[in-house]
Image (cartoon, grey):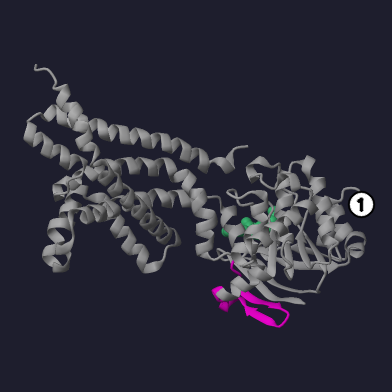
């Protein structure tokens, strides 16, 4: 066994640090879009809106049933061949679209379950005071459902952050892409990938701290 | 004046409301009594479409709603003309006591936020819960929650207040404070339709008592008559059960 090249590893830290914003940016934008889309899909499913409900089911089934990597390749390499306008799509955008759709499909199901878990009295009281469906969802049902769904959604966010590493297969130089390039130059694969692993690990751990605060805040109304 | 004509509700082929006809005068306080499973709650819930009636008409002043043809707009208008007090309080769990009262005012009725919150504070003072304004329902006793529930219904001047067994989910220790508040609300000359199993409360506040059984209005009249000299055998049998003192 050879000794680890600590000097190289240390030197790698500032190099990789420059790519953290892109990774976090892709993850945050995808998460925000996925949350919005997932909420919409969940509401369509809960409300049972005739045609949309069927489309939503197929959408969820497809994006949960196929690998994320396949979906990303489909968007970036495949679709532009059918729709030439999409050739302009850069890797970052393609990754964001893929991550959004993929994780929206998963999150829609957790949000749907959480919505259905909100007590019947909450729906009835909202209707009785004359709220529209949209007002009821936004002000009463979704805030309560989010408390139930939060732990699961944060787990998906963690998965999503790690999922951004697949963007390097679309030619995006994010954290993983940068590490890949460094390793190809130095041939120090172990050092490079252990450092990049620690990068992801630290990001996810930081998120876990945020998770505790978020869950505390969402439960504020429910402590006696 | 509110008129209900031939209101029916059918669950799985079984009629639960058998063509209810009822005229409600402005300011009248009507108490509905009757055995369990008779359709009392269903009647109240059909009036604001929490349950969708299967037939009949609901007439508010000059507006007639054929329930089989009610559009979402009609239903929304009905809901704005009525307020509802639930047996299980049904406070918004993610809103404080103050927000529970103000929510309908600013979200639905488009009051300014300040104005709505001030109104909520006024109501909270009236119901004796000014110190609980920022408490969430989970931190309130059953009695306090129901008082907020009543406060929420009081906060708007609706044409009809629907009250479904306001005390029957409460621990005995909280019943009295809620009945006291209900009496005060009843003194405000609101038009009210109240379902209750509290017979002495009914006697106290009702202008008219309705006895329902099997989805029908069996007998109605002033409380003095219904409680002291009921005519129908079914009314008599029911009162014998719930008023053990009056043999
Ligand atoms: N969602 C429903 N589905 C099927 N049947 C129902 C439903 N809601 C009520 N019912 C039936 O309708 C009948 C009337 O119910 P309702 O709740 O109106 O009675 P109630 O007079 O309010 O009784 P209680 O005094 O117990 O509250 C009952 O037989 C009940 O089982
Ligand atoms: Mg009932």
In which quarter of the view is residue B214 placed? bottom right
In which quarter of the view is residue A24 placed? top left
Q: Please identify the residue farthest to the bottom as the structure is shown.
A: B62
Q: Residue at x 50, y 58 (%)?
A: A138
Instruction: Please state, as top left, top right, bottom left or bottom right, where the N terminus of chain B lies in the image.
Output: bottom right
What residue is disc 1 on? B246
Q: Answer yes or no: is residue B37 visible.
A: no
> In the rendered structure, does residue B97 fall within the stretch colored magenta?
no
- Is residue B20 shown left or right of residue B180? left
Q: Answer yes or no: is residue B192 visible.
A: yes
Secondary structure, mark 1, is loop
Q: Which residues are magenta?
A: B52-72
Q: Residue at x 21, y 56 (%)?
A: A94
State whether residue A157 is above or below residue B28: above
State whether residue B27 is above or below residue A155: below
Q: Residue at x 23, y 41 (%)?
A: A18
- Residue A65, percent from left and from top: 24, 50
Q: How many marks?
A: 1
Q: Residue at x 81, y 59 (%)?
A: B185
* Tag 1 subunit: B
In which quarter of the view is residue B221 placed? bottom right
- Residue B136, percent from left and from top: 63, 45
Q: Quadrant of ligand 1?
A: bottom right
- Residue A119, percent from left and from top: 55, 50
- Is residue A118 shown left or right of residue A100? right
């Amino acid at each position: 066994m050879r000794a680890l090249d600590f000097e190289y590893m240390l030197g790698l830290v500032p190099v990789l640090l420059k790519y953290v914003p892109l990774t976090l940016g892709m993850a945050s934008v995808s998460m925000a879009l996925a949350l919005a889309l997932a909420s919409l899909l969940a509401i369509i499913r809960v409300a049972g809106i005739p045609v949309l409900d069927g489309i939503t089911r197929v959408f969820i089934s497809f994006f949960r049933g196929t690998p994320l990597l396949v979906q990303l390749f489909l968007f970036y390499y495949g679709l532009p061949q059918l729709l030439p306008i999409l050739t302009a799509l850069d890797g970052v955008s393609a990754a964001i679209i893929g991550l959004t759709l993929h994780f929206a499909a998963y999150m829609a199901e957790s949000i749907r379950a959480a919505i259905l878990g909100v007590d019947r009295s909450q729906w009835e009281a909202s209707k009785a005071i004359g709220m529209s469906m949209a007002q009821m969802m936004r002000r009463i049902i979704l805030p309560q459902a989010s408390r139930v769904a939060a732990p699961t959604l944060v787990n998906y966010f963690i998965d999503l952050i790690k999922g951004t590493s697949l963007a390097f297969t679309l030619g995006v130089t994010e954290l993983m892409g940068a590490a890949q390039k460094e390793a190809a130059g130095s041939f120090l694969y172990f050092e490079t990938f252990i450092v990049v692993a620690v990068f992801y690990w630290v990001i996810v751990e930081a998120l876990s701290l945020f998770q505790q605060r978020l869950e505390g805040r969402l439960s504020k109304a429910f402590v006696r | 004046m509110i008129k209900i004509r031939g209101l029916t509700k059918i669950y799985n082929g079984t009629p639960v409301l058998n063509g209810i006809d009822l005229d409600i005068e402005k300011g009248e306080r009507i108490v509905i009594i009757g055995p369990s499973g008779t359709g009392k709650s269903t009647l109240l819930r059909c009036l604001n479409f929490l349950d969708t009636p299967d037939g009949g008409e609901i007439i508010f002043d000059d507006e007639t709603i054929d329930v089989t043809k009610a559009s979402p707009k009609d239903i929304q208008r009905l809901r704005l003309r009525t307020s509802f007090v639930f047996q299980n309080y049904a406070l918004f769990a993610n809103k404080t006591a103050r927000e529970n009262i103000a929510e309908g005012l600013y979200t639905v009725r488009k009051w300014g936020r300040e104005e709505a919150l001030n109104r909520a504070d006024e109501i909270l003072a009236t119901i004796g819960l000014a110190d609980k304004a920022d408490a969430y329902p989970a931190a309130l006793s059953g009695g306090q929650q129901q008082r907020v529930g009543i406060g929420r219904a009081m906060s708007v001047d609706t044409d009809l207040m629907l009250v479904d067994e306001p005390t029957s989910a409460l621990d005995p220790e909280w019943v009295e404070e809620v009945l006291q508040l209900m009496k005060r609300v009843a003194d405000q000359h609101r038009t009210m339709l109240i379902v209750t199993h509290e017979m002495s409360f009914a006697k106290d506040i009702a202008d008219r008592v309705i006895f329902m059984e099997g989805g029908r209005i069996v007998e109605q009249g002033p409380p003095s008559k219904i409680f002291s000299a009921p005519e129908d055998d079914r009314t008599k049998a029911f009162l014998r059960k719930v008023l053990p003192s009056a043999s």
